[in-house]
Amino acid sequence: MNKTIYSKKYKEIISRLSKAREALKLTQADVASALGKPQSYISKIERCERRLDIAELIELSKIYKKDPKYFFEI
């Protein structure tokens, strides 16, 4: 049984990331390619299996054309 250690607020941030990606009609593979990472990298972030750090959030916000603050407006 998998248990997550991530808070509700963290999950909301990740949900905003997923929605921002989908709004631009980008696949996980598109985003991963832009970062030079495998598709599973983005998949694990979106499933809360991999912790996202602030530097990664900044890179993702550039790809998603959002100010990083957007993801914290919860």
Image (cartoon, helix red, strand yellow):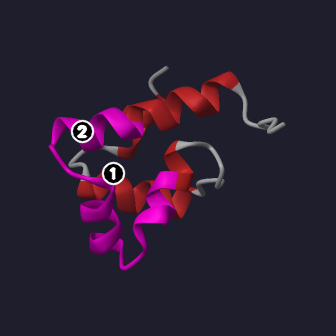
Q: Could you say which disc has been placed on residue 11 in the image?
A: none
Mark nearest the camera among 1 and 2 is 2
Residue at 64 percent across and 55 percent down: it is 50
Outermost residue toward the left in this view? 25
Question: Is disc 1 in contact with disc 2, using a CB cutoff of under 8 Å?
Answer: no
Residue at 45 percent across and 57 percent down: it is 42
Magenta stretch: residue 58 in it? no
63 displayed left or right of 69:
left
Q: Where does the image place residue 8, in percent across and percent down from the top left?
A: 66, 23
The local secondary structure at tag 2 comes to helix
Magenta stretch: residue 18 in it? yes
Q: Which residues are magenta?
A: 17-43
Give the crowd class for mark 1: few <14, some 14-19, many >=20 residues within 10 Å. Answer: some
Task: Give the residue number, with chain letter if any, for mark 2.
Answer: 22
27 is higher (above) or lower (below) than 23? below
Name which residue type carries label 2. Answer: Glu
Q: Quadrant of residue 21?
A: top left
Whichever of callouts 1 and 2 sits on the residue coming sooner in the sequence is 2
Characterize the magenta stretch by its predominant secondary structure: helix
Task: Give the residue number, with chain letter if any, for mark 1.
Answer: 61
The local secondary structure at tag 1 comes to helix
Report the front residue among 36 and 40. Answer: 40
Residue at 66 percent across and 50 percent down: it is 49
Name which residue type carries label 1. Answer: Ser
Q: Where does the image place residue 48, in percent across and percent down from the top left?
A: 62, 43
Report the front residue among 24 and 47. Answer: 47
Residue at 15 percent across and 44 percent down: it is 25
50 is higher (above) or lower (below) than 70? below
Q: Where does the image place residue 12, in percent across and percent down from the top left?
A: 53, 26
Report the front residue among 69 and 9. Answer: 9
* Quarter of the rendering occupied by the N terminus: top right
Outermost residue toward the front in this view? 1
